[in-house]
Amino acid sequence: MKKNTVIILCLLSFGININTLAQVGKLEKANFKYDKYDYIDAREIYLKVVENGYKSAEIYRKIGDTYYFNSEYSGAAKWYYDLTKEFPNDAQPTDHFRAAKCLKTMGQFEEYERLMEIYKSKGGEVIAVGSYKNVADTLFKKRAQDKLFEIEKIAVNTDYSDFGPAFYGNSVVFASSSNSIGSIENESADLSGWDNQPFLDLYIATPNEALNLTKAEALKGDINSPYHESTAVFTKDGNTMYFTRNNYLNGKKGRDKEHVVRLKIYKATKNGNRWENIKELPFNNDSYSVGHPALSTKEDKLYFASDMPGTLGMSDIWYVKILGNDIYTEPVNMGEVINTPARETFPFISAENNLYFSSDGHTGMGGLDIFAVTLSEKEKGHGEISTFGVPINSPKDDFSFIIKEGRIGYLASNRDGDEGSRSDDIYQIWEHCEITIQGPVTEEETGNLIPGAEVTLIDSNNNEIKTMTVGEDAVFTFTLNCSEQYLIRAKKESYDPKEQVIETPKNPKTIEMPITLNIPMSLKPSDDCPPEDLGCRLTLQPIYFDFDKSDIRPDAEIELAKILTALKEYPALKIHIESHTDSRGKDLYNLKLSEKRAQSTLNWLFDKGVSRKRLTAKGYGESQLINKCSNGAECTEEAHQLNRRSMFIIQD
């Protein structure tokens, strides 16, 4: 190759970035000396081909791709959309999908929905990530401090203390101020825990479609008394409730020796829509407080907070075993690992058998903080205690935490006020649900790894979130949000790019999802376009001839129009046309046939105004097969097709 006559080329293939070189067509560029070929601007060639009246689904798709894979979605929208309208029979599902995605970025949501329906009706896939191998369970296997949450104050808080949420079916029961404040100064000064505050009752609210609690009503029946009620827990069948109340039953108020009305746990049963048959639990006592009940997952233990004798600090977490109807063992202290010389209170047992509680004795952020520990089947057995960072915990009091893990939860906190417990409000929390998706990029046919592949994560609005180039292990890893739609795009030179639409599940997981790339029929992974092969660089479709004929078919004219445009765009460009056949038929006959086809191709270009000085042509018959499909070999039609090719070689 003579360096002083090298022409500048521009590679266009799926997944390869386009470098627009405005001056590349100038004749003086050809006089520069280069060590290798550069690139022709293939997009401009395609556009000029269309301007000259040569149209096809394939060329519209190629133009759209030059915009799409460079994130120029408004430009891509025209070509994909026109493809679906002008060539509906040739439009592939991905054409409808890409047209839809591009139009969505332009705010055309109705057309986006319409095209997505066509995409699905034509067999386009939106894969649920959960259908792939789950290689790790929920993120709740992480320590509490490793989890991410979002938090929002609920709408039904009052100006006084609101706390103690509890799940009751699809509803939430919580403690809140009653409508009638009453004589606070006279009646609440001797009550344990809520000095000079309105009396609390138990209320119920059901989340709306947006999961907001907007309307609450008092529980019906005998639950709410003239004194405080709070912190309830319900059996799974919804027919039994344990709750906290001041020492008050059947119109009688009990006091300790210092005339303080302590807390006790009571039990109620449901009758229709009313709570009745209020009973005091046998381990209560007038001389100390017992409150904030929580049921184990099997409902065979009742946990609570108390300062009863044997307590290590101001209050501890205890439990009793439930042996039968109204039969309980003696209380058991949870021990000094959980309990400290300070306060431990507000236990809650989740469906995952995690104990959540509040403490100001364990190291936290200040005030009462929320801690978590996984319980075991062993007596008083449990794992390592962990805590939460913001926004769950704050420098003030954070307590009465409940959660349906992986979904929704609630807690109470006085973080937004300066009046102590008067500032207690209930907050709704969501675990920031994340999906970890990972897997290797491999060849579709061989299963071999593809190091160096570029993998991009794109959200539903076509925003590129992250792009990574895989290493020697060819493994990519992305973190996604739950319950959302994404696009994962993988590409590498010499391979067709792969785009996969995925929908993430509702629960956090780690998913193994491999991506396979297909080797285009015209290329091998180790053999990129030779720098002098113009047809390869312009991604020509195979130029077919009818059996035993050499005239140019209409479908081949579209491909030759690309070559013609390149020749007109770059006047210094000279090409040699090579025509090849497969091995079927006699060698001499194939040689003559390929020569006729090569000359036919040359004449087509000459008839379009290209000087013969810029064109040479030769037929090679079956002498230059690119695979093992020689005489007598058993090959598929697709394999034979690779040999029936025309090549356009740039001449020095």
Image (cartoon, grey):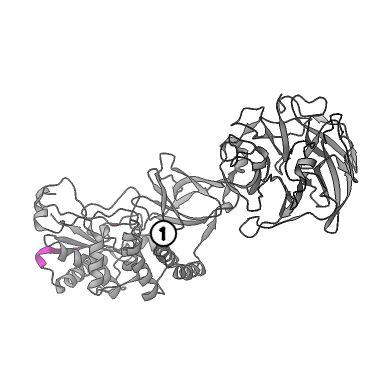
In the image shown, does 475 or 322 lie closer to the viewer?
322
Instruction: Residue 4 in the image: state x and y as whole percent.
Output: 9, 49
* 24 over 95 or under it: above or below: above
In the image shown, does 507 or 525 lie closer to the viewer?
507
In the image shown, does 181 or 572 lie closer to the viewer?
181
Q: Is residue 565 shown left or right of residue 125?
A: left
Q: Quadrant of residue 188?
A: top right
Instruction: Residue 215 in the image: state x and y as whole percent.
Output: 68, 58
Q: Is residue 478 shown left or right of residue 621?
A: right
- Is 627 in the magenta? yes
Note whether residue 407 is visible. Answer: yes
In the image shown, does 17 or 417 lie closer to the viewer?
417
Instruction: Residue 82 in the image: state x and y as whole percent.
Output: 35, 72
- Is 266 in the magenta? no
In terms of secondary structure, where does tag 1 sit?
Answer: loop
In which quadrant of the rendered image does the C terminus lie? bottom left
Look at label 1 and name its amino acid: Glu
Q: Quadrant of residue 199?
A: top right
Residue located beneath label 1 in the image: 634
Instruction: Residue 478 in the image: state x and y as whole percent.
Output: 48, 45
In the image, the segment drawn in magenta is 610-628
Note whether residue 143 is visible. Answer: no
Q: Is residue 1 shown left or right of residue 430?
A: left
Identify the residue at horizontal 42%, vertical 55% (top origin). Answer: 498
* 452 over 125 or under it: above or below: above
